[in-house]
Amino acid sequence: MSAAGGPQVRITDGALADAASALVEKLVGDGAASKLSAGDPTLWGPAAEPEASKRLSWVALHESSRPLVDELAALRRGLHDEGVDRVVLAGMGGSSLAPEVICATRSGGPVGGDHPLVVLDTTDPGQVSDALAGDLSRTVLVVSSKSGGTVETDSQRRIFSQVFEANGIDAATRMVVVTDPGTKLADLAREEGYRSLVEADPGVGGRYSALTAFGLVPSALAGVDIGELLDEAAQAAPELARDASDNPAIVLAAAMAAAHSAGAEKVVLADTGSGLVGFGNWAEQLIAESTGKQGTGLLPVVVEGPEAPGFADHGPDATAVAIGPEGSGAQIAVSGSLGGQFLLWEHAVALAGRLLGINPFDQPDVESAKQATRDLLASASDGGGSTGSGDDTPVLTDGPVEVRTAGDGSWLGTPGTLAEAIQALVDQTPERGYLAIQAYLDRLDDASFETLRPELAKATGLQTTFGWGPRFLHSTGQYHKGGHQNGAFLQITGSVADDLAIPGQPFSFGTLEHAQAIGDAGVLAAPKNGGTARPVLRLHLADRAAGLVALAHAVREVGR
Ligand SMILES: O=P(O)(O)OC[C@H]1O[C@H](O)[C@H](O)[C@@H](O)[C@@H]1O
């Protein structure tokens, strides 16, 4: 039995438990759990070994991150002594998802609470402006990037720096950098004399970095007791290292892999009262980016709760996973403390990678969308501002919504209305496929767009994901491009009322956001590995609020 208080995994579906048992025994027999906990890089085969040998330090972070507890407490005290207590985090994917969950969970909710953290993981000009409009006299900017070269993070740093100075604040005193040793960002932090440079453990990839400086620096500055978080992980670690059939990581890995073998590649995640806030948004990067490659993988579908469409009523292509107590409809229930669940899911996904036969530490398709964006920006600055092919004539304009496709859009035909266009996309979705809504908007001011996910899932019976762009590019984007090629994509962009220049760059935030959307749409639509092109419907909203109303009405007319 698992130790009391440690993470727990229960397969509540008898057929799935039976199917998983052979894989449980295989992992136990291979000694996979103890090898993983000892940092053995051979578990994923010879091709993955070079990468794996640089990516396994996360198994011991509950010990190696300890020195950060006192170091960060001192940094926080220094800032507080100067009245600086508003923490803004500039970072994408693995550099922001964990601290967002940590701060929201320890505050008891996503907004406000005892440990507020403003997470800036966007290029949407409105959302960037709102972050800049807070009380700058009390603000510290944590600039987090493992590679040190992520364009969103660099752009956010540039504009904060400019606006601090414009307000008479010495920007260098308000910048805390988290990055790997030797990056350009580390050099910059030294040259500019930034307040603090925290070099992270380079032996940990972004999505496994919750308990490195990437997860801990913003959380500690926001006042979270990070020692307690490490204690929770330390309590779970011995459980996860056991080569035993009740090791929760083995059970979870075996269940996900057995479901995958049976054709259920979607993992539907619903919180059933775990007390963890937004945990699914962290887990989805770990699952999607680790497994979604070479035309295979597990697609995480984060839903609003156990009553949401796609959870209890899912079809044979999905497995319902409760984060929290098991409830009706769940086939797997996962519970435990926040630190314990971080470590549990990391172990389980790494072990599932072994069972699926993929390397869980690379992300081979993420770069393609970044390159497409760079190409578009380069042609825009040559050609005077337009982002090129993305500004082509709409196939249809229905009220506030302009309708376009990407790649070979012949599947769309000549729709007469927005509803007909969405219906055409749904009709293109393969049997057991999925729909992905990708909204390049302001995830705070435009939060109501999230209601489109359950509406579309209900109307079509298809598993449906929702991602905010460009945030999802660093999370589920790998799966959408490299995983099972059975997705259909509904991309939404919106008009920008007040664009913002990016200091020192030839493009603005609005241009960058637009180029990211068009760049990714082109990559999604392009046929991969000899496969066929995938449908991408691009909707541009000339008016965001009116566009949402039009979309909501259109979705109600859709069916399957
Ligand atoms: O931390 P950074 O180097 O800025 O990277 C942020 C994110 O960028 C990419 O999209 C990777 O695929 C992610 O795994 C990573 O978390």
Image (cartoon, helix red, strand yellow):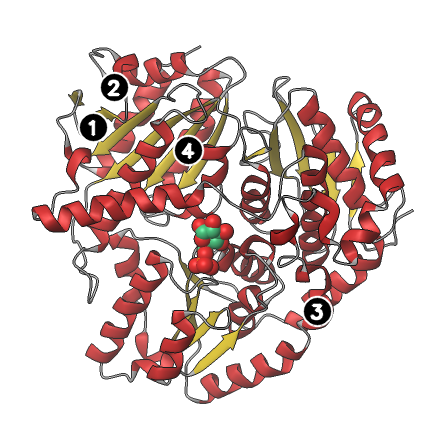
Binning the other alpha carbons within 10 Å of mark 1 as few (below 14), some (14 to 19) or many (20 upward) gives many
Q: CA distance from mark 1 to mark 3?
A: 49 Å
Residue lying at the far front of the rendered structure: 46
Front-most of 519 and 327?
A: 519
Work out whether mark 2 precedes mark 1 in sequence or the reverse, and give the earlier one: 1
Residue pointed to by mark 4: 451
- Which comes before the other along the chain, label 3 or label 4? 3
Pick whichever, 472 or 557, lies toward us. Answer: 472
Residue 498 in view, yes or no: yes
User: Type of residue at label 3?
Assistant: Glu
User: Of the residues tagged 4 and 2, which is closer to the observer?
Assistant: 2
Say whether mark 4 is within 8 Å of ligand 1.
no
According to the image, label 2 marks what residue?
418
Q: Report, in whole angstroms, how far the alpha carbon at label 4 lies from the one at label 2.
A: 18 Å
Q: Residue at x 34, y 14 (%)?
A: 423
Picture quadrant of residue 350: top right
Of circles 1 and 4, the one toward us is 1
Left or right: where 323 falls relative to 151: right
Q: Residue 465, position in %: x, y?
A: 48, 32
The image shows residue 376 at horizontal and vertical percentages of: 22, 44
Q: SS for tag 2?
A: helix
- Return the residue at label 1: 401
Which residue is denoted by mark 3 in the rendering?
228
Could you tell me which secondary element the residue under label 3 belongs to? Answer: helix
